[in-house]
Image (cartoon, grey):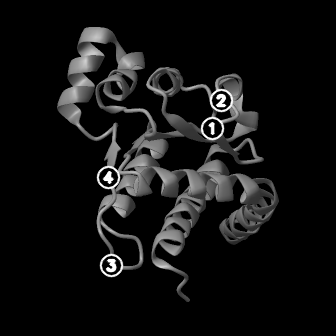
Amino acid sequence: MDISSRISFHFDDSARVVSQSHQALAAPLAAAIEMLVNTISNNGKVLACGNGGSAADAQHFIAELVGRFERDRIPFAGISLNTDTSILTAVGNDYGFDNIFERQVQALGQPGDVLVAFTTSGNSANVIKAIRAAHEREMHVIALTGKKGGNVNSLLTDQDVHLCVPHDRTMRIQEVHSLALHILCDGIDAMLLGDSE
């Protein structure tokens, strides 16, 4: 396959996965938006975590909440658990890498808060421990996964929302996760500020 064909394949494949994800994720995205709006409206906060590209997604999502998305508004309370290098290295050194998010959820999470957990495989040990800690703190969870959800499937309750991209390739899953976080931000703004074009 020449480079032009390869580029075309990626555009076409991404469009197919986005279309498949629209069908699979529309209802859970609506539920996730309602959950986030309820938390924000009740002075709760959003914690987010992930590893690698998923860490970038978690950080991006929180930046949109604390800063703004497309419209000026008050800042919403959110913390990305993968950005503080002192916490990550201290907890990683003292307790192990699998505990870097769990420890922060235990310290910061309150009943009614939301954990937004990104893991393309659904199997990241530190994200799984964060989800368990969130449940212990009576928090809700929005899990963004792919590859059929992995081990995260068995952790989520009826009070949680699972946004599982129907694909096995990491790059495609991350592309849909990025779209999903923009849809979440747009939905939050629409519900709290009113519709805009």
Q: Earlier in the sequence, mark 4 or mark 1?
A: 4
Q: Earlier in the sequence, mark 3 or mark 1?
A: 3
Q: Earlier in the sequence, mark 4 or mark 2?
A: 4
Element at badge 4? loop
Residue 160 marker: 1
Report x, y in % for residue 146. Answer: 68, 41
* Image quadrant in which you'd find residue 49: top left
Per the model, the C-alpha gap separating discs 4 and 2 is 23 Å
Tell me whether circle 1 and circle 2 mark residues in contact (CB < 8 Å): yes
Where does label 2 land, which residue? 156
Where does label 3 land, which residue? 72
Per the model, the C-alpha gap separating discs 4 and 1 is 20 Å
Please determine whether, in this image, residue 4 is positioned above or below residue 124.
Answer: below
Please determine whether, in this image, residue 176 is positioned above or below residue 94.
Answer: below
In the visual, does 110 lie left or right of 128? Answer: left
Type of amino acid under label 4: Ala
Where does label 4 land, which residue? 77
Please determine whether, in this image, residue 30 is positioned above or below residue 102.
Answer: below
Q: Residues within 10 Å of mark 2 (few under 14, many from 20)?
A: some
* Image quadrant in which you'd find residue 91: top left
Type of amino acid under label 3: Asp
